[in-house]
């Protein structure tokens, strides 16, 4: 199997090409002063495929981060993946950014990402809990023996470690999780949907 995965939901973009046993290419793209990293998604995919003598038709599956995260990044990621999978007849699977980050360390991870409005996107005990008030998150942390993983905004509030302060192979982690999901699911591209735990800001009054 030849698998392409990409993530434009978090603060950096990750594009990985791999087989079941080997990472062939892993590229990280950061925001520029004028453009959000997802603006470079198509060109980066093209670069990774070309550098590995791989045509889009050589791919067997696509995997992405479906969120939560940047609404622009979630839309870009999901749209490109669905179009490619449909046109190339590829299998496709999505993984939550919360599940990805839970694999960055610790035996009992709790992931809390800034959801604005005094809330955090919360994941623990292998389950997404939704957008939870920060005071409730603090209480949950105080009562459990969790390895807290968060972001730069919430780390001073919740403690633990910020994933943004470390150099974690998030693209490779995503690719491992996608392979696992493809073994247990049909991989139907039509089932690949963005994960909006809260509605996008344009939908809120």
Image: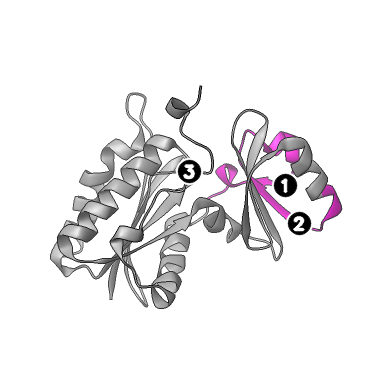
Residue named by callout 3: 196
Q: What stretch is highlighted in magenta?
A: 142-167
Residue 71 inside the magenta-drawn segment: no
Give the number of the mark in front: 2 or 1.
Answer: 2
Please tell me which residue is depicted at 22% across the width and 45% down the height of the picture. 42
Q: Nearer the viewer, residue 113 or 21?
A: 113
**Residue 117 against residue 170 in the figure, above or below:** above
Q: Nearer the viewer, residue 26 or 65?
A: 65
Please tell me which residue is depicted at 77% across the width and 41% down the height of the picture. 136
Q: Nearer the viewer, residue 22 or 194?
A: 194
Residue named by callout 1: 160
Residue 65 position in % (x across, y down): 42, 53
**Residue 197 against residue 87 in the figure, above or below:** above
Earlier-in-chain disc, 2 versus 1: 2
Earlier-in-chain disc, 2 versus 3: 2
Q: Could you say which disc has been placed on residue 146 in the image?
A: 2
Residue 176 position in % (x across, y down): 45, 68
Q: Could you say which disc has been placed on residue 54 in the image?
A: none
> Would you say the residues marked 2 and 1 are in contact, meaning their CB atoms lie under 8 Å apart?
yes
Residue 164 inside the magenta-drawn segment: yes
């Amino acid at each position: 199997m030849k698998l392409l995965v990409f993530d434009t939901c978090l603060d950096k973009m990750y594009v990985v090409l791999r087989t079941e046993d080997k990472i062939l290419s892993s590229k990280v793209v950061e925001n520029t002063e004028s453009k959000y990293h997802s603006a470079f998604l198509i060109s980066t995919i093209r670069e990774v495929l070309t550098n590995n003598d791989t045509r889009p038709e050589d791919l067997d599956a696509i995997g992405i981060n479906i969120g939560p995260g940047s609404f622009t990044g979630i839309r870009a990621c999901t749209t490109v993946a669905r179009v490619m999978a449909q046109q190339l007849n590829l299998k496709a699977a999505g993984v939550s950014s919360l599940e990805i980050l839970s694999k960055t360390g610790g035996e009992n991870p709790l992931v809390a990402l800034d959801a604005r409005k005094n809330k955090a996107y919360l994941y623990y005990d292998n389950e997404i809990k939704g957008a939870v008030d920060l005071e409730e998150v603090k209480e949950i942390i105080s009562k459990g023996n969790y390895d807290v993983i968060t972001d730069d905004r919430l780390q001073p509030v919740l403690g633990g470690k910020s994933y943004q302060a470390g150099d974690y192979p998030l693209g490779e982690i995503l690719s491992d999780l996608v392979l696992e999901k493809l073994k247990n699911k049909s991989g139907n591209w039509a089932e690949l949907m963005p994960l909006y735990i809260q509605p996008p800001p344009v939908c809120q009054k």
